[in-house]
Image (spheres, rainbow, N blue to C red):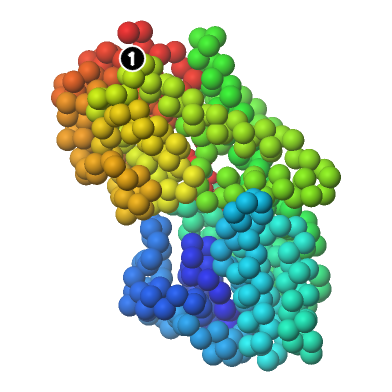
């Protein structure tokens, strides 16, 4: 089957590569000539483990190619996936649908035969109907269907998530579109991965409800963590004890410095907007958004405490600035709240991050970038574990503490323990939701 994917950003590229690996004939289209050139020369513009090899394998097998020309790509295609960006619009917090609608118009102009237009971008409930309207207005005689097929890919684990999904969600209006979608996902269907086929609005809603629920779960444990610190409980034990209840489940109960990334912040805000507009306020989601901001600011207070009330003149070594490990993405990362607060308070900040430097250089001006955690912590006053990259999980803490001016650690991902820190010679250690090491 010939499939076209519009947009070679994160979602589009991962989907296109994985569809070609299913055996489909895939053409990825983008307006950015630089990106298309890069992809055609075998380079992947994003960091995602395993994506480059999978891409090359399918390019070499002749099942995957990249082009600027949508009309040519659409020759003989049965489905077009729209995977363009839907950034949060400035001012009103709405998802900006300009790119989605522009893509729909172009598809309507370029299509000749029956086609299923599938929205993969996360879009407000009702968007797929708007896509249908725009297409009908553009080319009234065109025979087509729309479908909603939200993605649930986690950055850093996207290929696995695509190939072994918990479920695939498909929203359609006709049997014919359902059949095309079933053919596209046949390899997963054959391996008994569940496929939820539903109406357009429910499919659109599933994505928002799932992401808001996960953001709520994280925020809930973050709030419990703050209380644990006050009452002397250990949030790791609490999460374990809660998570063993199958109705709760153990995933997404890691307390930390607040969620970030390209999905949770954007989707929770969009859901809150949809609720307001429909006079059905999403009060829990609104609280989650506000609390997550507080969680990030609480991290700054923790560091301030470890710096005896002032950042001025202190040297602080930050381990990890991306919103989570195995990505170069810094969108809404807690580091964007924490690092400027340190710099603003007069600290000198050194940063180590295996992938974050490229984006971080623009987003965190004024920090010093280093490759080595030991060099970064040398003569410093505080080391902060902000993102739990594997590289930071087995540091020689004795060596780190030995090189620091005042050996103190803020472990905002609970990678180590107060005992580890004490044994290594740290004089101060603070983590999330667990008793601090007495100083
Ligand atoms: C998420 C969803 O998991 C995915 O299904 C959706 O389609 C896109 O958004 P992603 O943003 O890539 O994926 O990362 P994820 O691993 O879900 O982590 C999101 C954020 O939550 C990170 O900042 C992470 O550090 C934080 N998190 C996650 C926690 O603080 N605690 C947890 O227990 C889990």
- Residue 273: in sight, yes or no? yes
Residue 127, position as x, y percentages in the image: 73, 64
- Give the residue drawn at x 58%, y 83%: 2
Residue 30, position as x, y percentages in the image: 49, 76
Task: Please indicate whether residue 126 sits to the left or right of residue 253 in the image.
Answer: right
Q: Residue furthest right?
A: 279
Task: Please indicate whether residue 246 sits to the left or right of residue 68 in the image.
Answer: right
Residue 264, position as x, y percentages in the image: 58, 45
Task: Please indicate whether residue 191 sits to the left or right of residue 342 in the image.
Answer: right
**Quadrant in which the C terminus is drawn:** top left
In the picture, residue 130 is in which quadrant?
bottom right
Vertical relation: 38 (above or below) 195: below
In the picture, residue 55 is in which quadrant?
bottom left
In the picture, residue 248 is in which quadrant?
top right
| Residue closest to the eye, 352 or 310 | 310
Residue 77, position as x, y percentages in the image: 61, 85
Task: Please indicate whether residue 153 sits to the left or right of residue 361 in the image.
Answer: right
Vertical relation: 60 (above or below) 308: below
Q: How many tags in the picture?
A: 1
Vertical relation: 199 (above or below) 307: below
- Residue 355: in sight, yes or no? no
Q: Which residue does the numbered mark 1 point to in the structure image?
A: 308
- Give the residue drawn at x 58%, y 24%: 223
- Give the residue drawn at x 58%, y 27%: 221
| Residue closest to the eye, 144 or 309 | 309
Vertical relation: 436 (above or below) 243: above
Classify mark 1: helix, strand or loop: loop
Tell me the crowding category of disc 1: few under 14, some 14 to 19, or many 20 or more residues within 10 angstroms, Cα based.
Answer: few
Is the residue marked 1 within 8 Å of ligand 1, measured from its CB?
A: no
**Quadrant in which the N terminus is drawn:** bottom right
């Amino acid at each position: 089957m010939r499939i076209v994917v519009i947009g070679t950003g994160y979602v589009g590229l991962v989907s296109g590569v994985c569809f070609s690996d299913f055996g489909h004939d895939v053409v990825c289209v983008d307006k950015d000539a630089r990106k298309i050139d890069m992809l055609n020369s075998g380079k992947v513009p994003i960091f995602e483990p395993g994506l480059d090899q999978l891409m090359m394998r399918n390019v070499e097998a002749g099942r995957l190619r990249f082009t600027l020309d949508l009309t040519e790509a659409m020759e003989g295609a049965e489905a077009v996936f729209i995977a363009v960006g839907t950034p949060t619009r400035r001012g009103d917090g709405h998802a900006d649908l300009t790119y989605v609608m522009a893509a729909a118009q172009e598809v309507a102009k370029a299509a000749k035969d029956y086609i299923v237009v599938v929205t993969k971008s996360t879009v407000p409930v009702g968007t797929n109907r708007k896509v249908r309207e725009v297409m009908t207005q553009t080319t009234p005689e065109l025979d087509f269907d729309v479908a909603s097929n939200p993605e649930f890919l986690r950055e850093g684990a996207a290929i696995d998530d695509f190939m072994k999904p918990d479920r695939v969600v498909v929203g359609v209006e006709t049997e014919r579109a359902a059949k095309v979608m079933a053919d596209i996902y046949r390899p997963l269907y054959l391996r008994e991965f569940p496929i939820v086929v539903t109406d357009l609005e429910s499919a659109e809603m599933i994505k928002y409800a799932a992401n808001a629920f996960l953001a709520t779960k994280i925020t809930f444990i973050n709030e419990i963590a703050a209380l644990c610190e006050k009452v002397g409980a250990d949030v790791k034990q609490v999460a374990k004890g809660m998570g063993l209840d199958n109705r709760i489940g153990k995933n997404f109960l890691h307390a930390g410095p607040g969620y970030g990334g390209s999905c949770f912040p954007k989707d929770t805000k969009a859901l809150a907007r949809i609720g307001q507009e429909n006079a059905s306020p999403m009060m829990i989601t609104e609280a989650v958004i506000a609390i997550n901001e507080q969680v990030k600011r609480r991290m700054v207070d923790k560091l301030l405490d470890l710096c005896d009330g002032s950042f001025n003149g202190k040297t602080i070594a930050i381990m990890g600035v991306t919103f989570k490990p195995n990505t170069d993405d810094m969108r809404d990362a807690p580091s964007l709240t924490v690092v400027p607060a340190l710099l603003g308070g007069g600290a000198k900040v050194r940063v180590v991050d295996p992938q974050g430097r490229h984006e971080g250089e623009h987003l965190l001006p004024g920090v010093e970038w280093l490759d080595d955690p030991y060099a970064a912590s040398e003569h410093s006053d505080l080391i902060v574990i902000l993102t739990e990259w594997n590289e930071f999980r087995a540091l020689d803490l004795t060596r780190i503490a030995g090189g620091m001016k005042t050996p103190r650690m803020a472990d905002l991902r609970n990678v180590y323990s107060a005992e580890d820190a004490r044994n290594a010679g740290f004089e101060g250690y603070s983590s999330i939701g667990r008793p601090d090491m007495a100083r």
